[in-house]
Image (cartoon, rainbow, N blue to C red):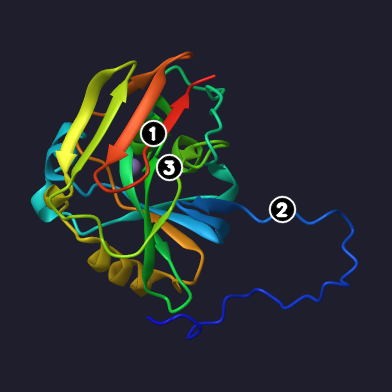
């Protein structure tokens, strides 16, 4: 689905529009080696996209088509900011992920290292009760993301990894993704109008685990700017 084919419901507003409250700021990602920024429209996330992680979460990876959930754009934490340990959980988990950014032509324009922070206890409760995942996944400051790299795909065999206080917790390769980034964009396009500024978090490999206040997280994908943050 190419950009512009579906109505989005948004309305054109002139710079002179008189809003009753100040409009929220445009959320954006820094770009590696470029002073310009990438404006973010929304964030979609793939649920399980590495076989070993699907198994550690109790699913059968062979039978699952990709499924999606979302985070609000303002859940992003960028420019080296540190996320606060969220309220209402005692089991915050890290999930390192390859993030794709949709460009002006509706195709993938760039790549980044992101972390899908998850209130795992709330997710387990939602799964058990058949409820939505929003409170588990789409909370404030739940999406730390490094600078975007414009250009071609990182090496498909490149390493994706995350360490906490210097100890490796997650390590896999992009080659272990069940659905490729391009396939994910195509699948998402069956469900939403994928537009310039959209980000898609493409799922995490095995090794997810808990974070506590003070933990120093370093997430890397070969060829991309690393993501580093400390849980406040
Ligand atoms: Mn995830």
Quadrant of the image containing the C terminus: top right
At horizontal 56% and vertical 32% (from top left) the residue drawn is 81
Nearer-N-terminus badge (2/1): 2
Find disc 2 in the rendering and name its residue.
25
Q: Quadrant of ligand 1?
A: top left
91 and 33: which one is in front? Answer: 33
Check disc 3 and report the residue beneath it.
131
Q: Nearer the viewer, mark 2 or mark 1?
A: 2
Inter-mark Cα distance, 2 to 1: 29 Å
Q: CA distance from mark 3 to mark 1?
A: 9 Å
* Quarter of the figure with the N terminus: bottom left
Q: Which mark is residue 123?
A: 1
Mark positioned earlier in the residue sequence (3 or 2): 2
Q: For the residue with label 3, is its CB less than 8 Å from the closest atom of ligand 1?
A: no
User: Of the residues under marks 3 and 1, which one precedes in the sequence?
Assistant: 1
The answer to whether residue 58 shows anywhere in this view is no
Across and down, in percent, residue 215 comes to 42, 16
Return the residue found at the far bottom. Answer: 5
The residue located at (47%, 41%) in the rendering is 143
Q: Is residue 227 above or below residue 64?
A: above
Q: Is residue 102 above or below residue 224?
A: below
- Crowding at mark 3 (Cα within 10 Å: few <14, some 14-19, many 20+): few
Up/down of 100 relative to 50, above or below = below
Horizontal side of residue 183 vs 122, given as left or right: left
Q: Position of residue 106 (x, y in %)?
A: 42, 76
Left or right relative to 58: residue 232: right
């Amino acid at each position: 689905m190419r950009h512009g084919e579906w109505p989005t419901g948004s309305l054109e507003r002139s710079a002179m529009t008189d809003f009753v409250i100040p409009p929220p700021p445009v959320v954006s990602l820094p770009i590696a080696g470029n002073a310009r920024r990438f404006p973010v429209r929304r964030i979609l996330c793939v649920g399980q996209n590495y076989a070993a992680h699907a198994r550690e979460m109790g699913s059968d990876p062979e039978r699952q088509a990709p499924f999606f959930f979302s985070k609000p754009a303002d859940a992003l934490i960028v420019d080296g900011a540190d996320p606060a340990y969220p309220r209402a959980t005692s089991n915050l988990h890290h999930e390192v992920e390859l993030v794709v950014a949709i460009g002006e032509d509706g195709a993938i324009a760039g790549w980044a290292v992101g972390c899908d922070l998850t209130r795992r206890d709330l997710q387990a409760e939602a799964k058990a009760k058949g409820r939505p995942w929003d409170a588990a996944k789409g909370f404030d400051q739940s999406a730390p993301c490094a600078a975007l790299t414009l250009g071609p795909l990182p090496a498909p065999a490149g390493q994706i990894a995350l360490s906490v206080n210097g100890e490796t917790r997650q390590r896999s390769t992009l080659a272990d993704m069940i659905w490729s980034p391009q396939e994910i964009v195509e699948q998402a396009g069956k469900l939403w109008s994928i537009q310039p500024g959209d980000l898609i978090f493409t799922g995490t490999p095995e090794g997810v685990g808990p974070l506590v206040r003070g933990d120093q997280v370093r997430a890397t994908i070969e060829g991309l700017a690393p993501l580093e943050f400390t849980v406040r």
